Amino acid sequence: MLKRGIKDGIPIGLGYFSVSFSFGILSIANGFSVLEAVLISMTNLTSAGQFAGITIMASLGSLVEMAVTQLIINMRYSLMAISLSQKVDRRFGISARLLLGFGITDEIFAVAMGSRKGISRKYFLGLMSLPYLGWTLGTLAGAVFGNVMPEIICDALGIALFGMFIAIVVPDMKGDIKIVLTVAIAIVVSCILYYVPFFSKVSSGFAVIISAVTAAAAAAFVSVHEDNKEEGISGRE
């Protein structure tokens, strides 16, 4: 189980290294030391939350502003944790669940939920280990070496996270129309929230939550409707 988790976490770890490299560069640019940048990544595993956090700290924002911002941006992880907790095995005790809560990211959640076997403590530990190391070491590398690299390369590293997530989702879309529907609805809702002026005040964190909940609710409605339809057909037979 541990080896399988480590194997599944390799592409996530590589992707996180490149993304956190940008975080390391931005941290130094905002006046943080190398040690401070690395400690932030070691104690937090949330890309959007960290980028927003250092911006607030650099602008001398208040603790209340920081708390509210982090709550909004990271609220989606609570939904992921609730969903993922239904798939873990019986030996997943309180301490392991706390580790699970800390280690959940969008990509780790997607891979774990896509696992066709139950999620054990060893599997999840292996799954989150390399992404955690990749995120931390990438931050260190960006903080130390980022200033000597061409700007175009540093900018390119910032889109690696999105490409990695697409690579996780697309294979499953090929064999399940429900997943295609879910992704399509999430994209449409996200575009509406981003481009329609009326929703311009909706934060990125809330936009993610609204898109995810709307898409999941629509997919659940379709699934229940199809199940009821199949039961009705079976009953008539």
Image (cartoon, rainbow, N blue to C red):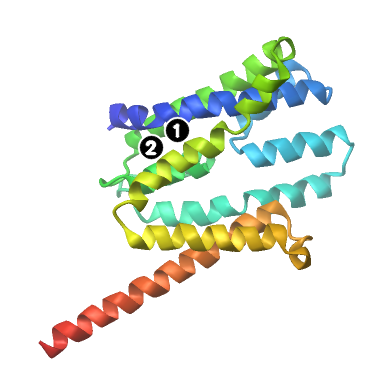
Camera-side residue of 92 and 12: 12
Is 134 on the left-hand or right-hand side of 23? left
Camera-side residue of 230 and 173: 173
Above-or-below relation of 46 to 192: above
Q: Which residue shows up at 36% across the image and 27% down it? A: 6
- State the SS at label 1: helix
Is 131 on the left-hand or right-hand side of 193? left
Q: Which residue shows up at 67% across the image and 58% down it? A: 206
Above-or-below relation of 39 to 61: above
Q: Which mark is residue 206?
A: none
What is the x, y in percent for residue 68?
76, 52
Q: Amino acid at mark 1?
A: Met
**Residue 193 in sight:** yes
Q: Residue furthest right?
A: 60
What is the x, y in percent for residue 207?
65, 58
Q: Residue furthest bottom?
A: 236
What is the x, y in percent for residue 118?
28, 47
Is 202 on the left-hand or right-hand side of 141? right
Is 7 on the left-hand or right-hand side of 51? left
On the rendered image, what quadrant is the N terminus found in?
Answer: top left
Q: Residues within 10 Å of mark 2 (few under 14, many from 20)?
A: many
- State the SS at label 2: helix
Q: CA distance from mark 1 to mark 2?
A: 6 Å
Name the residue that disc number 1 marks. Answer: 128
Q: Which mark is residue 124?
A: 2
Q: Are marks 1 and 2 in contact (CB under 8 Å)?
A: yes
Q: Amino acid at mark 2?
A: Phe
**Residue 96 in sight:** no
What is the x, y in percent for residue 163?
51, 37
On the rendered image, what quadrant is the C terminus found in?
Answer: bottom left
Q: Residues within 10 Å of mark 1 (few under 14, many from 20)?
A: many
